Every structure is written in C-alpha cells, then in structure tokens.
Image (cartoon, rainbow, N blue to C red):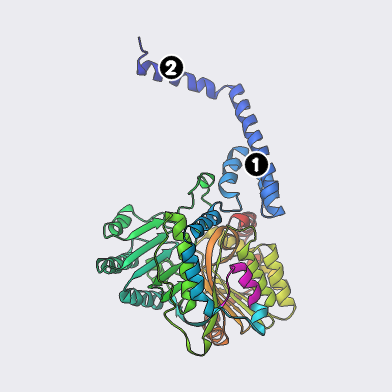
Amino acid sequence: MPIPAAVITESLADLIPDLLRSPTLWTALLVVAEIAALLSIVHAIIRARTAAGAWGWALGLFSFPFVAVPLYWVFGRKQFRGYRETLREAEKKREDLVEAVFDALEPHFCQLSGQEIRYGKLIEKLGRMGFTRDNAIDLLVDGAATFDAIFEEIEKAESYILIQFFIIKDDELGRELRRRLIEKARHGVRVHVLYDEIGSHKLKRSFVRSLEREGIEISEFQTTRGKSNRFQINFRNHRKIVVVDGRVAFTGGHNVGDEYLGKNPRFGRWRDTHVSVRGPAVLMTQLVFLGDWYWATREILELDWRPHFIAPDKGATMLPLATGPTEELEGGTLFFIHSINRARERLWIASPYFVPDESVRVALQLAALRGVDVRIMLPEHPDHKVVYLASFAYLEEMEAAGVRMFRYGAGFLHQKVMLVDDQLASVGSANLDNRSMRLNFELSMVVLDAGFCGEVAEMLEADFEACREIDGTDYTSKPLHFRAGVRLARLAAPLL
C-alpha cells in the first residue's frame, strides 16, 4: 500500500530541523566547500589573468568558500570559449564567402607608410586585418545627431539592415526604432537585430515578438551558449553596430534608450559620440556583425560585399578593431597600451569609467613623464557607483606623474574617444576599464587621418571647457567613510 503524500511531507518537515541542527551535516558541508575552494584556488593560480587577481581570488575562496566558490566559477574565467572555433566552422562552410570578402577588400588595403607605421602597424596585427583607404567618416555628437543619421539611412534601405546594440529598451526611442524597422520589413527589406541579453535584460518579450511577427530576425547574443559557458554570465557583447545595405555603417557609444537622447532627468544631457562610415571599412564592420550573428544563430547571412563608396584622394585610412575575450592575447589592453606608448605630443581620452590595470596606469604615467599632454576626461556624476568610487583610487598616482584628470559637468559623459597626437583617433564602445579590455566584445573605429583627428581635437576641446580639473585632493579631502568605500571598490577592480 503506497504511503500517503501528506505522511511523507510531515515526516520530512520533522526531519529537516534535526538535520539542520546536526554538527555532522555542517562539518560535511564545510569539508566539501573547502575541497571545492582548494580546487578553485588551484584553478585560479593556473588560469587567472594576473598575479593580483590570483591572490585576490585565493584569499576570498579560502576565507569565504560558500560565497566565493560559485562567484569564482561565474566571474573568474578569463576566456570566452567556442567563439573562434565556431567562426572557423563558418569559414569552412562558406569558403566562397571568405574569398569574396577579401577579393572586395583587396584593392583597398593600404601599405602604411611614414608615421602611419608607427601608430598603425601593431593595430593591424591585433585586428588580423589591414587598414583600408578610400573611406569617408563623420563625427556624430550626441544622440540627436546619431539617431537622426541612423534613421535617415534606415529610411533609404533597399536590401537589408543590420542592428546590434548592447542595450535596447522598450521606451520612446526603442519604439521609434521598432516602427521604422517594421515599416522597412513590410516593404521587403531584410532586418536582423542582435542584442546582449544581460545589457538588455529589461527588454520585454512582447517587444521581441512584435518584431518577429513582422518577419524581422531578432536574437540575443547568447553569451551562455555551449556547455562550458552555461553558467558564465560575466562576458558581454558591448558592440554597437548599424549597417545599411553594405554602404554605410555606424558605431560608437550610444545604445537604444531615451537617456541617450538626454530625456532621463537623472542624467540630463547625455554626452556621447558615434561615427558614420562609408567605404571599404563598412564591409569590415559588416564582417564583425556577421561573426556575432553566426555565434548567436548559426546562420550565415547573404550580404552585399561590394564597396558602394570610394572616397576621392584616397580618403581616410581606418580599421574597425574588434576586440574581445576570445583570444589568448588581450587585444583591448594591448590596443590601449600601444596607443599610449606611441603618443609624443598629446594623449586625450574620454571614458565614463576609469579602472585601469597596472600596465595601463604605468603607460599613462610614463607618457606624462616624457612630456606628453595626457588628459583623462571622466563624468562628474556616476551611473555605476562602485566604478565611480574606484576611479578616485588612482588620482594621487596620476597627479604625481603629471597626468591631468577632468570631470565633465554638463551632463553625463558616456563617450569612448581617444586622440593620439594628430595621427590616430578612435571612437567606439571600449571604456578605460578592465571589463572593456578583457571581458567585453568591443568595436573601435581606429582612424589614421590628420583631418579627422583635427575634428576630434576640436570636439574634445569643447568638452574640456565643460570640465573641472581634479587632483589627488578630490580623494584625500573626502570623509573617511568615502575613502574606505574607494579602497573597497578598488579591490573589486578586476571584476569591474
């Protein structure tokens, strides 16, 4: 005769309190936790990105195993697995596509010469792709200029639209983008939308379904795809890409949300920068999207690989530099350090976050000590409190070397822009922090063109006018509880 469920439930209810009071149970759990912590410590020592990171994880795992062990296996990995192998699989499937892309780009790859070699040669190795000439590029300052330009090109679309953002929100701007995409889809234009599931975690399923019903293909990036990535949520696809018909591309710092148009009362003006590109660099940007789309969907899109625009007089020399946690080399870190080391006269960087590792801090200090005008522009008001606090920890050492630090006060600063002398400018999605350098998929449009560098310099000069210069006293003059928070935030720097 079967035992009634009520009897089983009552028996378990009586048993559980006794188990929880059992010293034997807690001893067994502690032993299991310590064994898991020990194995995790060994893994951290072997696999951690830095010695400091290994020590930090080892201390946490040993002291607080119940909390630190699951945190380590979620946040402790340094490499995103499977992405490179998946792209190689796609290349084997479509060798004809690979050949077509490089045949289209081959006439436009350029041999760097003179100062271009000094600034750009190593970047070509990091990007595994050459710089191209024959491009045109326009700065788009702030959200209105950016989305007006994007919407104008969407309106002109005849064949396909590629959309990729870290954040897409179901708000006024998000719904306007949706309306325009649906309108083009109804006229036979193919639309493909990709978003990061962590960055867009608030995006409603109804928003996604409304696009799918119109035949628009929309997908999460699927960071956790693959058995080895199932519990790994620390990586992000932070890229922002729009490509229309293979003839124009957009990238930069904006996401899709009303705050990027300055409509959030908490932040006020949202200071950000995007670029629009025409020429062969569009095809290279399109190739980055194609790789991310294949990872997410295992679908190889049929796209136009003909350059639609050739700038007169060779145009601007540029390379869309895609970096991410898929390589043994830390491409994001190496890009920043190389650019800093190349600087001779000025190095201006605008970033919403300043949590550099030791190698980047040393490079910045050395640049200032050799007489380079090094300026770092940060926001006055934070959007992420811990990251904001961590930035104060570096003020004294930056000041000691002559690095000038500024806080932007005319709204919230979110642009990711770097200017090196009058030779190299970069506009993209990469911040000056550990996450962008090591954990995120990023895209930076790197431009070797004196004319464009002049435009970036003029833009940044106007931004510096809206800043106040800060120094070590902005940290030392703060009350004890604030300084304690800064030190605690700095301990979390490898995770920020």
**Residue 308 placed where, x, y %?**
41, 79
The quarter holding residue 84 reads bottom right
Out of 204 and 380, give the one closest to the viewer: 204
Tag 2 secondary structure = helix
The quarter holding residue 7 reads top left
Amino acid residing under circle 2:
Ser
Tag 1 secondary structure = helix
Crowd band around label 1 with a 10 angstrom C-alpha radius: few (<14), some (14–19), many (20+): many
Give the spatial CA distance, label 1 vs label 2. 37 Å
Quadrant location of the C terminus?
bottom right
Out of 315 and 411, give the one closest to the viewer: 315
**Residue 464 placed where, x, y %?**
55, 80
Residue 180 in sight: yes
Amino acid residing under circle 1:
Ser
Please report the residue visible at 43 percent of the width from the left and 82 percent of the height from the top. Answer: 309
Quadrant location of the N terminus?
top left
Q: Earlier in the sequence, mark 1 or mark 2?
A: 2
Is residue 333 placed above or below 85 in the rendered structure? below
Is residue 388 placed above or below 297 in the rendered structure? below
Mark linked to residue 40: 1
Q: Which residues are magenta?
A: 120-131
Is residue 412 placed above or below 60 in the rendered structure? below
Q: Please tell me whether the stretch drawn in magenta is mainly helix, strand or loop.
A: helix
Along the horizontal axis of the image, is 494 left or right of 186? right
Residue on which disc 2 sits: 11
Find out whether residue 127 is within the magenta segment: yes
Out of 254 and 280, give the one closest to the viewer: 280
